[in-house]
Each structure stands twice: as structure tokens, then as C-alpha cells.
Amino acid sequence: MCGIVGVVSQDPVNQLIYDALLLLQHRGQDAAGIVTQQGRKFFMHKAKGMVRDVFRTRNMRSLPGNCGLGQVRYPTAGNAFSEEEAQPFYVNAPFGLVLVHNGNLTNAHALKQELFQTDHRHINTESDSEVLLNVLAHELEKVTRGLTLKPADVFAAVRGVHQRVRGSYAVVALIAGHGLLAFRDPYGIRPLCLGRQGDNVMLASESVTLEGTGFELERDVAPGEAVFVDLQGQVSSEQCASAPALKPCIFEYVYLARPDSVINGISVYQARLNLGATLAKRVISTVPPNDIDVVIPIPESSRPSAMELAQLLGLPYREGFVKNRYVGRTFIMPGQSVRKKSVRQKLNVIGSEFKGRNVLLVDDSIVRGTTSREIVQMARDAGARKVYLASAAPPVRFPNVYGIDMPTPDELVAHGRTVDEVRQIIGCDALIYQDVDAMKQAVGQLNPNLGGFDASCFDGEYVTGDITAEDIARLNQGRDQTEEGTEDTSRLALPNAQVA
């Protein structure tokens, strides 16, 4: 998971892209980068860190031009990540290409060999985004042979990319002297939307980016579709996949996206309200509501679900945890020891809401279990008589290979364990999970045109249909063992394979 944005404007875009990346900061806190184009020349700055820390006044002044793109990076490589692997990536032929990517290529290893042996292209990092850039460059070179570029050539190149690449990918690329290209994988696993502000055009991961910068959301980029925006802001598009089907990652609605975004025609906020409603039915079947004194969300993604659940059960809703907004999201902290340490730095309890009460904590999901165990213990330390825990998502039992940090099954707390075994590890008095089918129905009913979801981390069904046990094992080769948890309750160590 990353956040990407691209802009073609009549005015300088450096500040606009910076503001857009701030609105996407929740999608990645490990690194940030911006590239702009003036004439046929690219200007780039990228580094590890948050947007506000990466870009200073001197950096912004060195980014002239009326079109550009940017990315915030989600950390998936532990301590092994180097600044060279921050995005955007650049290749000088054909024309000059710069690319940002959100997703994960499941056949990156094979593509890298193919690029070297057949296409004679060199890959300098471990990043699958650099692989994707070189595949796009090769396909563009095939259809243009270095001659004048037309939109039809761009779409032909994207068709070639779809035929070679597997996995999830939402892409924005700049073609020097020509314009901006955006495209999405044939299943639309990762989000990408288009908006306008007069003659200015923006493409971004989430609608909140458009709205927060004065653009109006026009539509989502369709799965398999390519959109080309020339330097005058003229937009052309074409379906480039042979059998597209919209099956987005359901974890976007559970946790990843901002609640004020609309993705694939679905309000993320309403999706989370619906998840709370279906979760309420599960709670009733496990814990009598009269045995619960108060419902308390674990900030922040779970708030809509917790509010809806409390209202339907007729229970008081209270804020029991105060979040330090200057600590990164623990789900995407790079490394298990850092993640564990950050929980109490990030959350502090309001003791009066716990003392002498039976509390129902509501979280958006339980992945590794370590954070949940810490939070349950914090509630007990604050004087709670009983601590129940409800998850708005089902048990995470399978690895995710499409760009979320869930690569190994053995380190998922729910993998191979019953709900009661997970409950004992976490230390709560009752553990209530969402049902997989109920989750899909709760979100899916908000857009009947969806072909389904990628819910592979919950049901083990991978929408691309090409994932084997060997693929998952390969993704985890060379992991950074220094950050690997040693307890059975550890959630995940981080793969060496680069994920955008």
C-alpha cells in the first residue's frame, strides 16, 4: 500500500503535489518523493521520512514545472530499505519515463530475469516498481521505435504491460515532453481516481486527495483502463485489458483508506458503519449486551463501526483511548520490536472509562495480535473488570501478496488457531470476529456493480488466480531476521521483496 498522485496543470504543481501527498500520508510514512517536468527535463527529490520532513523550502524551489507526480511509501522491507528504493523511479528511454506505483507484482522475480535476458534491461534495486517501469518502457519502445508518440501508442504499450505483469498495480507515469499516463490492473485491486479543476487534471489514490486540493472527483479509473493526459490537459482513455473485472481489495474499506474517501463508488465511512451493524449481530450471539457497560473504539479506523454497533445494541459509546497523532500507524511500523514499543507511546487510556466496568473494545482488524494484547492489558491496568474484544474484520488467516504487509501465514495470530486460542493469546474475556460473507455483503451492497472483492487475507482466494505456496515462500526469502518476533503472538516480520 502506497499513495500516488499525478497532476497536469496550467500553473506550477510543486505545492499542489506536496499538499496532495499530505492528504495521502496515511497510506505511507516511510518515504516520499516528487518529480516535476519543465520542458523535457525532469526535476526530482525523494528521501526517507514523512512528507513534511522530506520537503524543505529549498527542495520545493528546485521542482519547477506544470506537471508532475508524487508518492508516499508504505514500509515493507524492514531495516533493509534504502533511500535508493524510494519512488519515483526514472528510466531515460524511450523519451524519458518517471513512474510511481501502488501495489505489488507477484511475478516480479520472473519479470526481472526476462528483462535482463530478453529485453536487455538492467534493474538496479530490489523494487518491483523498477521492474514495472522497465516493462512499460520496453513496451513503449516496441510500439514507437523512438518515433513520435500518440495516445494510441501509449494504450498499445499498456496492453503489453497487462499481458506480461501479474499482481496489483495502480500506476501514474510521466512521459517526457508528452504528458501523464495512469493505469490500473485488470482487477482494480488498488484504487485510482480522476478529478478536474477547470483545465487542470489530477489522478490520485483516494478521492479525499482531490477534494482537499480543490479538485472535483469525476470518476474512478476502471480496472484495466489506461488514461493519458497531454500537456494541455486533454484526456483520452481506453480499456487495455482483455477481461477486466472490478474486484478491489476489501482491506481498503476495513482499514487502509481514509473514511472521507469514496473508492469504487463506495463511501469508506458508510462501509465501516455497515461493518459495525453486521458485527453487532455477532456480538449478541457471543456476549449478552446487558453484560457490557460501555463500547470503546481502538482509534481510529474502528470508530464508525464501534458507533454503529453501540447504537444498535443500545449501549453507551465512549472514547477510552487518546491517540498521540505524532506516532506512526502501528500496523505499518517497520519491525516487530518497534511496533510493540510504539503501542503505549501512541495510545493512552482515560482511566475513568474503564475502572470497574465491563468494556467492549472494537478494532478494525486483528493481524499480528501483539497490538491487541497490549491494548487489552492497558484496559485491565486501568481497572476494567472484563475486557471483550470485537473485530470489524474476520480473522486474518492468509498472506496478502498484493501490497499489504501480511506475507507469512505462520506469523498471523489467527492462522491455524481457533478463535478461543487467539482469545487466550490476546488475553481478553471474549473475542468476536466479523463473518467473511457478512463483511463482503456489508461492503458490496454499496455498489452492486462490483464483481466481488479480493479478500484473500481472510478467505485465501487470490483474485489473480496465479498464487502458489512457492510464490509465497519466494516473497519471504531473505527476510530481515533482526526484527522477527520470537513469540507465537508475533504478527509478521517483513519480506525482502519490495512492495509499493
Image (cartoon, rainbow, N blue to C red):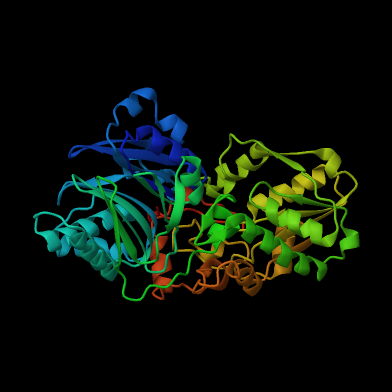
Q: Nearer the viewer, residue 276 or 232?
A: 232
| For residue 402, side relative to residue 337 (left or right) | left
Q: Nearer the viewer, residue 276 or 156?
A: 156
| For residue 362, side relative to residue 227 (left or right) | right
Residue 49 makes an appearance in the image: no
Point 52% across, 61% down: residue: 265
Against 333, residue 189 (above or below) is: below
Q: Position of residue 30 (x, y in %)?
A: 45, 41
Point 69% across, 63% down: residue: 422
Q: Position of residue 75 (x, y in %)?
A: 45, 47
Q: Nearer the viewer, residue 126 or 248?
A: 248
Q: Position of residue 275 (x, y in %)?
A: 67, 63
Point 82% across, 39% down: residue: 351
| For residue 435, side relative to residue 220 (left or right) | right
Q: Position of residue 462 (x, y in %)?
A: 46, 72
Residue 153 makes an appearance in the image: yes
